[in-house]
């Protein structure tokens, strides 16, 4: 090989080496610049049952329910009511859409207790709420019947009934205290015809009764004796008047 041939051979080697080097560098740079493919995880629902065919069946996400708010119509109503002539526990309860037991419980009354005209009753709300100041309902006043007792003034002592009117030996006026205890000394019971009984020193407890007999006898805590010579309550329409020591009319009763 002469010198010329050697020079050509060396030149070709240099060219081939440079070409191979450039190819390797290009391949290395391309591999470094390309982003690595990262598998994207697929979110799967938790605790999702498989269908009959084995495929996953997605279920609806649970709903969060807001707490119900109280209806404004459910607001408790409570008031006071003043007993009018002709009222009974059942009629008042019916007018206010209550049961008799609710009315009794709200006023600490027992079944069978008598009402007195002018007595204030608590009308509870539907949920038992305390009374709030409200205007007292105004009801028409019916005519007083023969069997009604009318109570006026501050004390709640009423004439419940007159038993055996016209039968002197058995005739008696029954008084009932439906308020706080009261001493009856100085009170009077009269027939409107000039005949008057004055009560002795006698304390009448709440819900207690005392009978005033027309004839004579020995007074006790439950029975008093007027000492009249004949019957006082035999005539239909006769009226018994009960007054306190100041002469204020507390109750009346008309004989049927």
Image: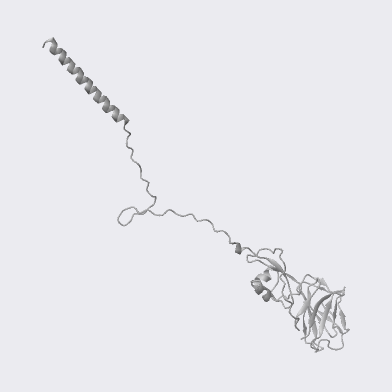
Quadrant of the snapshot with the N terminus: top left
When asked about the image quadrant of residue 21, the answer is: top left
- Work out whether 72 lies above or below 23: below
Nearest the viewer among 232 and 59 is 59
Q: Residue at x 66, y 73 (%)?
A: 95
Q: How is the image coloured?
A: one colour
Residue 174: percent from left, percent from top: 78, 80
The reply, left or right, for residue 87 in relation to residue 31 is right
- Work out whether 57 lies above or below 20: below
- Is residue 18 visible to the viewer in this orientation of the structure? yes
Quadrant of the snapshot with the C terminus: bottom right
When asked about the image quadrant of residue 235, the answer is: bottom right
Nearest the viewer among 67 and 253 is 67
Nearest the viewer among 68 and 178 is 68
Residue 164: percent from left, percent from top: 78, 87
Nearest the viewer among 122 and 32 is 32
- Is residue 158 visible to the viewer in this orientation of the structure? no
Residue 20: percent from left, percent from top: 22, 23
When asked about the image quadrant of residue 220, the answer is: bottom right
The reply, left or right, for residue 134 in relation to residue 229 is left
Which residue extends farthest right? 194
The reply, left or right, for residue 5 in relation to residue 198 is left
Q: Residue at x 14, y 13 (%)?
A: 6
- Work out whether 125 lies above or below 234: above
Which residue extends farthest left? 1
Q: How many numbered marks, from 0 up?
A: 0
Q: Residue at x 29, y 29 (%)?
A: 30
Residue 241: percent from left, percent from top: 83, 80
């Amino acid at each position: 090989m002469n010198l010329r041939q050697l020079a050509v051979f060396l030149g070709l080697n240099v060219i081939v080496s440079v070409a191979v080097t450039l190819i390797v560098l290009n391949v290395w740079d391309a591999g470094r610049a390309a982003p690595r493919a990262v598998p994207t995880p697929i979110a799967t629902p938790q605790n999702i049952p498989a269908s009959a065919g084995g495929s996953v069946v997605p279920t609806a996400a649970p709903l969060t329910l807001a707490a119900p708010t109280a209806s404004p119509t459910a607001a408790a109503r409570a008031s006071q009511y003043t007993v009018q002539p002709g009222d009974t526990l059942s009629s008042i309860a019916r007018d206010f859409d209550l049961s008799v037991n609710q009315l009794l419980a709200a006023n600490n009354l027992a079944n069978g207790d008598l009402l007195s005209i002018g007595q204030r009753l608590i009308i509870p709300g539907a949920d038992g709420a305390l009374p709030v100041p409200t205007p007292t309902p105004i009801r028409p006043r019916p005519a007083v019947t023969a069997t009604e007792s009318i109570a006026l003034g501050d004390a709640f002592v009423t004439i419940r009934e007159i038993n055996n009117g016209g039968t002197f030996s058995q005739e008696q006026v029954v008084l009932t205290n439906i308020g706080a205890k009261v001493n009856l000394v100085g009170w009077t019971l009269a027939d409107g015809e000039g005949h008057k009984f004055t009560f002795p020193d006698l304390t009448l407890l709440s819900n207690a009764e005392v009978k005033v007999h027309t004839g004579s006898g020995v007074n006790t805590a439950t029975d008093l004796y007027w000492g009249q010579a004949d019957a006082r309550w035999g005539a239909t329409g006769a009226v018994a008047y009960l007054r306190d020591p100041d002469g204020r009319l507390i109750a009346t009763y008309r004989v049927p």
